Amino acid sequence: MQFPTFVSTLAALHDANGEPLQLKPGASPEEIAEAEAELGFAICPALKAAWLSANGGTAWQTVFARTGYLTGYEFLSLQAAMKQWRGMRERAPRYADYTQPHPRDPRLREGWFQHGWLPFAGFAAPTLMLLLDHTPSGQGTPGQVIAFTHDPDAMDYVCSDFATLLVESLAQIEAEPEDLLAE
């Protein structure tokens, strides 16, 4: 699924539940290039296209959702995503001996932080975040979506790519609008 199609369908769901979808004007190509220079890698094309279309949404408004969870995630602006990425990178040395409380999916690298984990959505970020994994393990796929949960800190596999997350988000929001789109 492409981001414009997702936004159109999501906007209709928001309208039907009395909460108009509010997305910000897109990031500029120059802002994307600056972020990529700082990151040291190219942002996944699907996420880059989303940020060029809409540079995040309003606080606390559900744009993304995980299958089986009743928590909506707001769409972080590129600037907010970079702030979360920098924060995780700066805190990472404190978690050098980190061990996840449950077995980690083999598609994800070990550790509390990997340089290629880029947040793009959050619920009270950094408490809960969705990240695009640009540096998966040998069993993973670049561009897979993973979730960070704080306390106890864990990284979990969500889905194979951004397009799949869009489809799954719509299905979860359609199934639970009273929980995910409540005013």
Image: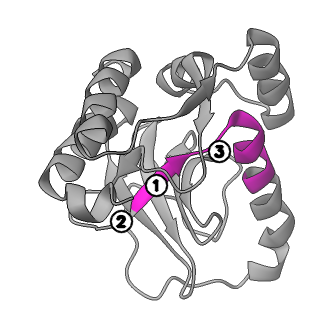
Point out residue 49 in the picture as x, y percentages from the top left corner.
Answer: 53, 17
* Number of the label disc, if any, that sits on residue 105: 2
Dot 2 lies on which element? Answer: loop
Nearer to me, 54 or 35: 54
- Looking at the rendering, in which quadrant would you find the N terminus? top left
Magenta-highlighted residues = 72-84
Q: Name the amino acid type tagged 1.
A: Tyr
Left or right of 108 on screen, residue 30 = right
Image quadrant of residue 164?
Answer: top left
Nearer to me, 44 or 107: 44
Residue under label 3:
116
Mark 2 or mark 1: whose residue is earlier in sequence: 1
Q: Name the amino acid type tagged 3.
A: Gly
Residue under label 1:
73
Dot 3 lies on which element? Answer: loop
Point out residue 25 in the picture as x, y percentages from the top left corner.
Answer: 64, 20
Nearer to me, 109 or 125: 125
Residue extending farthest front: 18
| Badge 1 density bin: few <14, some 14–19, many ≥20, Cα 10 Å | many
Dot 1 lies on which element? Answer: strand
Q: Is residue 131 visible?
A: no
Mark 3 or mark 2: whose residue is earlier in sequence: 2
Residue extending farthest top: 29
Image quadrant of residue 31?
Answer: top right
Left or right of 46 on screen, residue 164 = left
Question: Quick check: 151 above or below 74?
Answer: below
Q: Is residue 86 visible?
A: yes
Task: Tell us which disc is closer to us: 1 or 3.
Answer: 1
How far apart marks 1 and 3 lie (CA) works out to 20 Å
Residue 21 belongs to magenta span = no
